Image (cartoon, coloured by chain):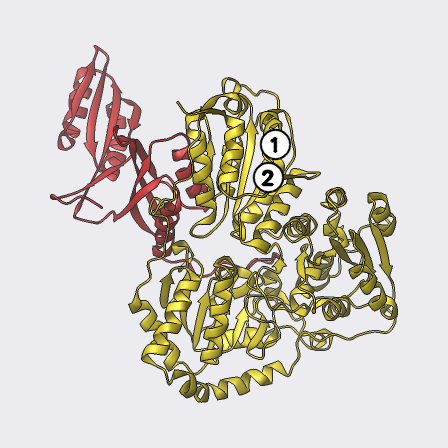
Amino acid sequence: MSKSKSAYSTPGKQGKFDTHIIVVWVDNEAGVLARVVGLFSGRGYNIESLAVAEVDAKLNISRITIVTTGTPQVIQQIKLQLKKLVPVHKVADFKREDKKVIFKEMALFKLVGNNLKIQKAYKACKKYNPVILDKTNKSHVIQITALRREIDKMTKNLKKFGLVSVSRTGAVAMTRGSEIFK
Amino acid sequence: MSKLYSGAEIVFKCLEDQGVKYIFGYPGGAVLPIYDELKNFDSIKHILVRHEQGAGHAAEGYARSTGKPGVLLVTSGPGATNAVTALTDAYMDSIPLVCISGQVPTHLIGTDAFQEADTTGITRPCTKHNWLVKDIKDLPEVIHKAFEVATTGRPGPVLVDIPKDIQFQKTNYIKNKKKKKLNGKNNNKFSQKDINELIKLMNKATKPIFYTGGGVINSGPKASELLRELVHMSGFPITSTLQGLGSYPGEDSQFLGMLGMHGSYEANNAMHDCDLMINIGARFDDRITGKIDEFSPNSKKVHIDIDPSSINKNVKVDLPIVGDVSEVINSTIKTIKKIKPEFTKSNKQKISKWWEKIQKWRSVNSFNFVNSDETIKPQYAIQRLYELTKKKDTYITTEVGQHQMWAAQHYKFDKPNRWMTSGGLGTMGYGLPAAVGVQVAHPNKLVIDIAGEASVLMTMQEMSTAVQYSLPIKIFILNNEYMGMVRQWQELLHDKNYSESYTAALPDFVKLAEAYGCLGLRAKTPSELDDKIIEMINTDKPVIFDCLVDKQENCFPMIPSGKPHNQMLLGPQDQKNKKITGKGKTLV
């Protein structure tokens, strides 16, 4: 127990943290991303990754996918607070373990080294739909699509094959089957 | 082809359309085109403040005392940043404000132009929504939308930032169209099932309590009427938050007084021991709940709120009802009358033991204090002020600190919209400009700012506004020369190290009043207090009343230090017995 003489209560017991993927459909207008991100930082919520782009040019709708962690209460608050924002149309929330939802992230790896090393790297990526996007005598750029933690693993594994640069998109999500989230 | 209007004209056409009568503002370079149009719109009166924060609080006072949105007009840069405190204050206390700010011309945005600030960026976290209007064609719709967002659902402040070139450009005016639905943000979707469940709980309870808040006030005067009916019908005790005072008559026997950190002994104990808590339009604020883990441990909790994000934010509840307070209460009363007409009678029997217990707590008389013949006790001053003004329909505003708590404890309200205080943000300097706004809205009513000498100096300049518009506000200063609440905490928690909480070189408030062109009064002894208060009330111009009170008085009772509701610290007598120690110190 700290000895600080604060005007506020001390924190209570903290619940278990879950990882959730929150998908937000918003009007594609100036400042909308700042509103969403500002809500997270202002209220002390986490953002692990963030992906955003316009998905409907006619209706002017962007889709924001945020990976976040928090206790069930915090996740509930995040959803309710997001729904209050004026440009937000709907909010979906998926647990990472949810089998009904596909999560994917894309990564680009730049590898520098001899052909042998690069072949090995390509082989290591085999499971994750590798595509070679650029090739020179000394270097390759490989694209993979995979889960977040698989990409984490690959960035570690590829170090020994001459990985010099990584760029990744952040997770995007979509439900399986014919249904769409209303 | 229809007539084209300039952006500046459109601003006023929208305000006219929205029924705005008063705007509070301060001119500057980036809003000059709007100020230029002011003369052409007779139905809108501009109140020139002395600082943009004052404009914001005045607009808040106007809004809270009328239930209509308050409007302020400020310039770019410092004009807008000065308004930020008031916007944040309104955001915390859910007050509908529409702030119109000027901005540098669009081609200069982002160039660090003179008096440029990222106003929409700065105000994003302290408004419900804000807009930077970059196309003149959007302007009418944006302003109408701004009013809609500010006043629907849980009310709050909004801001419309209008670059100077947009104010000159011309376009068609579009009248406000009443929309049925606001982008799914209107949350009034409770079901009859919820109401039935509530009545079931009410019927079962043996130790129930109503805990009501500012949401009742925000729901309109009808909500207060319905609340009274429901409370009488049920026979349940009722307590109110600081913001909810006035929604239920303060002198009624079912009313237990305010709850929370400086609330009454009976209210807090009843909250702790109850078996059914019905929260109506309150938000389980940390000043109310004390230690969350031990907050009302054995009760079923019902939470009625228009804002879904208020539910389960701080305290988990058993029955959430998302909806407008007056509609939920109305539906509850109707259902009781229909399905349980015998409820009113059978119920009172059932909770009679509970009332006996409450009477015992009540007999402690926790707002009591040791009066004196020589020095004016601040509580006594407020009691006298109340007795001498209660026959009039008086509007009270306050600053923030001890005087605010004493006012909440000792001034009894029996109507909603009569009590304006900064609760969520706790803004010192709120009360004086708020009184200006209240008096603008109610020119013939008695408006008193119960103030502390430290708070009131933060926005003292607005006295000049009061004089300019002949607003006879009364500034009743409980002057103890200390930032009283700071001093109290230092006394109780920091070993009486009164670090920087004493104000040396205070102005002579009587002379200050005279300098502003109003009347200054001073009371030094209890014996002269009544006459001076009467003189203040009978003066038809602004008054600064310097009431010299006991410098050492502390505000009791209080929930100290890591304690739940049922372990309150009572007055000086009780305090000797229970010293705050160790762990407790972290929690006051």
Residue type at mark 1 is: Leu
| Camera-side residue of A77 and B128 | B128
Looking at the picture, how far across and down is residue A81, in whole percent? Answer: 39, 48
Q: Amino acid at mark 2?
A: Ile
Chain A representation colour: red
* View extreme (top): residue: A137
Q: Which x, y percent locates residue B364?
A: 65, 81
Q: Which residue is mark 1?
A: B38
Q: Residue at x 52, y 38 (%)?
A: B15
Q: Which residue is mark 2?
A: B44
Lower position in the chain sequence, tag 2 or tag 1: 1
- Which residue corresponds to the image point at 76% horizontal and 66% vertical from the top-left? B378
Q: Is residue B548 above or below residue B250?
A: above
Q: Which residue is more in the foreground, A51 or A127? A: A51
In the image, the chain rendered in yellow is B
CB-based contact (under 8 Å), mark 2 and mark 1 = yes
- Viewer-nearest residue: B10 or A30: B10
Decide if residue B260 is in sight here.
Answer: yes
Provide the secondary structure element on which disc 2 rests: loop
Q: Is residue B479 above or below residue B339?
A: above
Tell which of A34 and B407 is nearer to you.
Answer: B407
The answer to whether residue B110 is seen in the rendering is no
Which chain letter goes with mark 1?
A: B
